[in-house]
Image (cartoon, coloured by chain):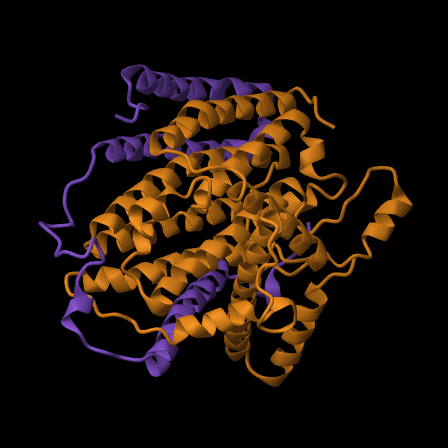
Chain colours: A purple, B orange
């Protein structure tokens, strides 16, 4: 096994936290720099929404097309499936044909779900 | 093959001879942070230049050539320009979410960045579910985009963000499935393990047909995942001005731009990792002397070279195909890529269980 624990740090949460803080630090640093050197000018018109030039009518944080929800729900189904398949994928070589058979049942149910959504017309963009 | 962890180990022993353990760890974490920050911003600058030169070559133009030799400093100048732009204060936005969105987008790409295998022994986070972690963190980015569009209180941004959300979550499935296919072949989800499994031959050759299908699906889904053309409808300029980041100005906009280019690098880096062996040199089983010569090329060069070539393929898509419509885009994913991906996974499982691969 190739050991790649950088600096011999075994604590992965610490490394992930470092990367996370680096990302946040990059944004904060650049914003601070921009705040120092960027100009400021004030005009009430600049605070308006960037649309077609005339004031926006109605609320923009409004309801939107239901089709987006439908795809989000379908995504949820298949994403959870992928999560469940990962442990099998890692151990499949040792599980062999038995493991393949049992995962095929799980897999079949999911494919049925996709077929159902397809037949019901959930995959059509209307 | 030189092991780069020798360098980090030397720094570690040097630091621990000077100071107590907790301080060593802190200093090393700061070093990692500074390193990540440097590589991140340098790669972003390079990628902006790279894409501009590449698309110029495709369109028979010269591309940036005024600032610095061969226009090499053009993106540095651009970066400076974007820093001195005013950050416009908007009236009707949700201030907290508006400010939070760029953080989420950058953090998602930075975390994915830390998992990439940069070279032999040069990888920040490596643990047994590394590739799974990578998929998980890269999907934080879509939250940032959705929040950016929603909090801007603008109809263009709302439509852009929703399109982007629908597109990114849909294509994530295909990415997940092709990663899963390759994890099946490797038998491990750790990034180091996947590379080690390719030490005799890269997976694209080893896994023959399923690996090829997975690679094609991964590249298409990866292009969609980075919101690049022909899948760039979230920011279709002709319809939505700039899509989800219409209301962002100055460096605030720059963060989305930066993250987009870095996501391109991450997507091609993961493609290099899964299909072309990460930093592993090109090895042919049996050709001992050839393999030995290949080992002389440094592992960092191998990894970056593969990632840049794969990025070029994705850029090539952008400058070749016209933009899709949203119904075509979702039909492509749900009616073609997803069923093919599922079938491909089953095929790969059968091939491995019945031992039909090389």
Split into 4 quadrants, where in the image is the C terminus of chain B?
top right
How many numbered marks have been drawn onto this rendered protein structure? 0
Image x and y of residue B241, in percent? 31, 51
Image x and y of residue B303, in percent? 67, 53
Split into 4 quadrants, where in the image is the N terminus of chain B?
bottom right
Query: What residue lies at 43% left-to-right and 70% top-to-bottom?
Result: A26
Query: What residue lies at 43% left-to-right and 73% top-to-bottom?
Result: B81
In this view, the residue farthest toward the left is A58
Query: What residue lies at 34% left-to-right and 34% top-to-bottom?
Result: B326
Given residues B137 and B260, the one toward you in this image is: B260
Given residues B317 and B167, the one toward you in this image is: B317
Image x and y of residue B38, in percent? 54, 70
Q: B310 left or right of B301?
A: left
- The answer to whether residue B225 of the structure is visible from this angle is yes
Q: B352 left or right of B155?
A: right
Q: B280 left or right of A86?
A: right
On screen, residue B228 above or below B257: above
In this view, the residue farthest toward the right is B289
Image x and y of residue B251, in percent? 37, 68
């Amino acid at each position: 096994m190739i050991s790649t624990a950088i600096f011999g740090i075994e604590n992965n949460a610490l490394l992930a936290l470092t990367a996370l803080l680096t990302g946040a630090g990059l944004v904060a640093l650049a914003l601070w720099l921009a705040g120092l050197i960027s100009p400021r000018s004030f005009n009430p018109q600049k605070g308006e929404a960037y649309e077609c030039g005339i004031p926006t009518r109605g609320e923009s944080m409004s309801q939107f097309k239901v089709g987006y929800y439908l795809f989000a729900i379908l995504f949820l189904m298949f994403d959870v499936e992928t999560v469940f398949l990962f442990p099998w994928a890692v151990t499949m070589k040792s599980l062999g044909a038995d493991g393949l058979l049992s995962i095929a049942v799980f897999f079949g149910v999911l494919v049925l779900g996709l077929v159902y959504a397809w037949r019901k017309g959930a995959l059509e963009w209307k | 093959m030189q092991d780069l962890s020798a360098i980090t180990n030397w720094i570690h022993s040097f630091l621990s001879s000077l100071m107590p353990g907790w301080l060593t760890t802190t200093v090393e974490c700061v070093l990692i942070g500074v390193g990540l920050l440097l590589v991140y911003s340098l790669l972003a600058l390079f990628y902006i230049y790279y894409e501009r030169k590449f698309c110029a070559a495709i369109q028979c133009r010269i591309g940036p050539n005024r600032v610095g030799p061969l226009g090499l400093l053009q993106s540095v100048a651009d970066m400076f320009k974007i820093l001195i732009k005013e950050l416009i204060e908007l009236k009707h936005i949700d201030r907290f979410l508006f400010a939070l969105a760029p953080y989420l987008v950058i953090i998602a790409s930075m975390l994915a960045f830390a998992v990439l295998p940069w070279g032999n022994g040069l990888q920040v986070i490596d643990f047994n579910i590394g590739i799974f972690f990578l998929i998980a963190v890269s999907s934080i980015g879509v939250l940032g985009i959705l929040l950016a569009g929603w909090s801007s209180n603008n109809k263009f941004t709302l439509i852009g963000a929703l399109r982007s959300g629908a597109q990114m979550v849909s294509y994530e499935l295909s990415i997940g499935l092709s990663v899963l296919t390759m994890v099946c072949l490797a038998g491990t989800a750790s990034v180091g393990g996947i590379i080690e499994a390719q030490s005799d031959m890269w997976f694209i050759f080893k896994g023959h047909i399923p690996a090829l299908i997975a690679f094609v699906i991964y590249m298409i889904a990866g292009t969609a995942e980075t919101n690049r053309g022909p899948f760039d409808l979230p920011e279709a300029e002709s319809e939505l001005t700039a899509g989800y980041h219409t209301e962002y100005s100055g460096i605030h906009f720059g963060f989305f731009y930066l993250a987009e280019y870095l996501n391109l690098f991450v997507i091609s880096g993961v493609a290099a990792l899964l299909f072309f062996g990460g930093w592993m040199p090109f090895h042919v089983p049996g050709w001992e002397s050839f393999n030995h010569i290949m080992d002389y090329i440094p592992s960092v060069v191998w990894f970056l070279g593969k990632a840049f070539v794969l990025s070029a393929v994705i850029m090539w898509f952008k400058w070749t195909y016209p933009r899709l419509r949203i119904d075509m885009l979702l039909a492509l994913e749900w009616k073609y890529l997803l069923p093919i991906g599922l079938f491909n996974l089953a095929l790969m499982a059968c091939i491995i269980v019945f031992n039909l691969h090389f």
